Amino acid sequence: MHAHVPPVFWPVLWVYILRLWLTLYEAALEGRETVLYTVGRSGIIYVTHMADSEAERRARCPLGKGFDRTPWIRLLPLDLGRLAALFQPQFRETPPLHPPCTANTPSLHHLAAPP
């Protein structure tokens, strides 16, 4: 890690190494299998991934056999009645991005000086 971080940031790195050790210790106590981290150029260590603990794995139970995974297939189309006019597509001409053609306007270079 020290080769990746400039010496001026080593005190910051040492603080974050201590915090990383405490995080790894807590992860081991909770039964987490993997902890991934990255070291920044400023010495800050970021934990990028932490596996689920045993308690979190037990809390996620499998879904029952009667669970409907695609309920939207059974839905009937909505009857909007008079509100259906609000949802009809309306096609309008797109306004031009530039002002109208200025080819016929006189240029300042072609104006004659007043007599």
Image (cartoon, rainbow, N blue to C red):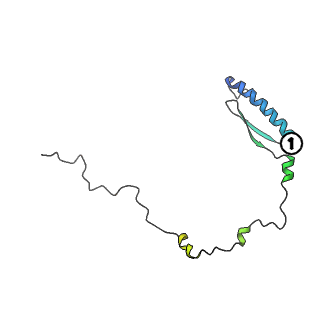
Residue pictured at 49% horizontal, 69% vertical: 90
Q: Which amino acid does label 1 sit on?
A: Glu
Please state which of residues 82 and 102 is positioned toward the viewer in this rendering: 82
Q: Nearest the camera: 95 or 59?
A: 59
Instruction: Tell me the residue that label 1 is attached to.
Output: 30
Q: In which quarter of the image is the N terminus?
A: top right
Q: Position of residue 28 (x, y in %)?
A: 86, 39
Residue at point 84%, 46% (across, down): 53
Residue 52 against residue 15 in the figure, above or below:
below
Residue 51 in the image: x percent, y percent?
Answer: 81, 45
- Left or right of residue 58: residue 41: left
Residue in the image at 64% along x and 73% along y: 78
Query: Residue 13: percent from the left, percent from the top?
Result: 73, 28
Residue 26, percent from left and from top: 84, 38
Can residue 79 be spotted in the picture? yes
Mark 1, other Cα within 10 Å: few <14 / some 14–19 / many ≥20:
some
Q: Quadrant of residue 17?
A: top right
Residue reaching furthest to the top: 7
Count the numbered circles shown: 1
Per the image, label 1 sits on a secondary structure element best described as helix
The quadrant where residue 16 appears: top right
Residue 111 as seen in the image, left or right of residue 56: left
Relative to 64, is 22 above or below? above
Left/right placement of residue 31 relative to residue 80 reads: right
Vertical placement of residue 7 versus 62, above or below: above
Residue 1 seen from this side: no
Q: Quadrant of residue 18?
A: top right
